[in-house]
Amino acid sequence: MNDAHLHMVVNHFPIIGTILGLGILIGGLVFKNNSIKNTAYCLFIVAALFSFASMNTGEGAEEIAEKLPNVTDQIIHEHEEAAEKLALVLYLLGAISIVGLYLNAKKNAKANLVSFLALTVAAVGVFLAQQTGTTGGEIRHTEIRANGTATTGATQSETAIGGEEDDDD
């Protein structure tokens, strides 16, 4: 398993974990149930840990990806910048979640305030996760790039199946 493969294995959980955690936290707040909130906190902590793993495998993946055709330094740089912002937010969310778990265990009056703080930070995290996932996907999935660099591949496919020619008889 090379660094790019390892990066692909760990990089999806920070995104999915944050989205799921946000939904679960909302449920915990709606139902006023600390067990549900604690589940969300645990997901946020795991997402932060996987974010750390993603950041630590990113450099090795970059070394491999930058040698691939149609992968530019610009595309990699945009993903790296988005990932760094997401990682910082998830580290903060993980720390808030640890505090939330502790306050819920102690039945502290400030536990609810921490829940709303976690909700806010998680919402920011989901926004940044979307950006990070999209910029990461653009590295190898040229079809989702805004500038449409996938047209070369599409033209080759269409030509192979006899497409792109318009027969108006």
Image (cartoon, rainbow, N blue to C red):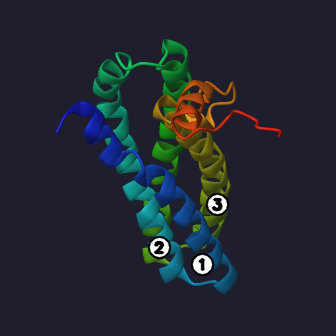
Pick whichever of labels 1 and 2 is earlier in the sequence: 1
**Which mark is on residue 28?**
1
Is residue 21 visible in the rendered image? The answer is yes
Work out which quarter of the rendered image holds the N terminus and state it.
top left
Q: Is residue 87 left or right of residue 134?
A: left
In this rendering, the answer to whether 169 lies above or below 150 is: below
Vertical comparison of 7 with 9: above or below:
above
Q: Position of residue 130 (x, y in %)?
A: 61, 46
Q: Nearer the viewer, residue 147 or 57?
A: 147
Question: How many C-alpha atoms fall within 10 Å of the one at disc 3: few (<14), some, or many (≥20)?
Answer: many
Please say if the residues under marks 1 and 2 sit with CB atoms less than 8 Å apart. yes
Amino acid type at circle 3 is Leu
Secondary structure at badge 1 equals helix
Q: Identify the residue at image location x=42%, y=50%.
A: 12
Where residue 5 appears, as percent x and y from the top left, is 27, 39
Q: Residues within 10 Å of mark 1 (few under 14, many from 20)?
A: some
Of mark 3 and mark 1, the one earlier in the sequence is 1
- The residue at which mark 2 appears reads as 38
Q: Position of residue 155 (x, y in %)?
A: 60, 29
- Residue at mark 1 to residue at mark 2: CA–CA distance: 8 Å
Mark 3 element type? helix
Is there CB contact under 8 Å for labels 3 and 2?
no
Pick whichever, 17 or 166, lies toward us. Answer: 166
What is the spatial separation of the Cα atoms under label 3 and label 1, in whole angstroms? 11 Å
**Residue 160: which numbered mark, if any?**
none
Residue for badge 3 = 119
With respect to residue 102, does 74 lie above or below? above
Mark 3 or mark 2: name the one nearer the start of the chain. Answer: 2
Circle 2 residues within 10 Å: few <14, some 14–19, many ≥20: many
Residue type indicated by callout 2: Asn
